[in-house]
Amino acid sequence: MAAPDPFIGRDILNGEFRILEKIGTGGMGSVYKANQTAMNRPVAVKILHPKLTNRKDLVSRFRREAKAMSHLSHPNTVRVLLYGELEDGSLYIVMEYLEGKNLNQTVRSEGPMPVERALPILIQVCEALEEAHRAGQPFVEQRWLGGMLTNFKTIKTSIRRLKEMEQTIEGGGLERMSKKEALTFQREVDKLNKSIGGIKEMNALPDALFVIDVGYHKIAVAEAQKLGIPVIGVVDTNHSPEGIAYVIPGNDDSSRAVRLYARGVADAVLEGKAQALQGVVNAATGEFVEVNEEEHAA
């Protein structure tokens, strides 16, 4: 007879969440359905197997996964609410809870999917993966915070504060706070992530700014213009191209069009990174050109 799961029925994070049942398991950990007591809403909690907590490589991998997932905001990815370490050393990720069958359960119960049904699912998965892999550039998805460029010194202070708070969470700091303190602390982290989470790895002013809706983000354009930062902008017919160094005439309301612009810029960034890296390699190793010995002797 299998031993009872030690997490089911347990309260974690000072009673903020109560583990209700196990809904999945894998090689690294188990996923549970839990209830967030204060908000009375279901959440999913992934916990690294306690027996693996002494494996530094797996612990590091779990932490990287949690951090990477917390940066995603694509509609086809599950939103991470918080992550860190429990009082017993177990690592956890709290995510939004989605009702329904997963893809594996659907295929097992209904059999192979027809192409017309599988293709939209595959497209959604690919879009989510693309979002994850392209998260290497700083971005702003909410309204532009005034002074994000012109007052970057102050913004860097907020970024440092956000990183310190996230480190506190990762180190299990919430468990050492009272329930009220933990909720207040988490709300501040969420607020900072909403406003500057996309630029927290931006250590200096950018060399260029890509803006999709130059009317909505006119403050961003004005700040970049003031600092001499070139702006690549999608300019619709109802907006002025003033202040835009590189104008892309186009529709800024169509989701398909926006996706096309973003993909094109992302491709250009990745290609530029690859070329820059190759340049560094060439400079470090020297570019050796084979010379025909006979021609050299001549």
Image (cartoon, rainbow, N blue to C red):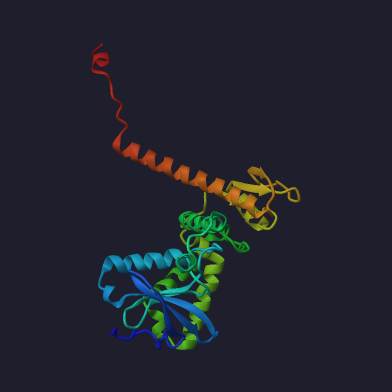
| Residue 227 shows up from this direction | no
Instruction: Classify 105 as above or below 112.
Output: below
Along the horizontal axis of the image, is 209 left or right of 295? right
Most extreme residue toward the right is: 238
Instruction: Classify 297 as above or below 166.
Output: above
The residue shown at (49%, 79%) is: 185
The residue shown at (34%, 65%) is: 61
| Residue 11 picture location, percent across and down | 41, 87
Most extreme residue toward the top is: 298
Q: Quadrant of residue 115?
A: bottom right
| Residue 8 shows up from this direction | yes
| Residue 166 picture location, percent across and down | 43, 72
- Nearest the viewer among 209 and 128 is 128
The residue shown at (43%, 40%) is: 275
| Residue 221 picture location, percent across and down | 64, 53
- Nearest the viewer among 89 and 119 is 119
Split into 4 quadrants, where in the image is the C terminus?
top left
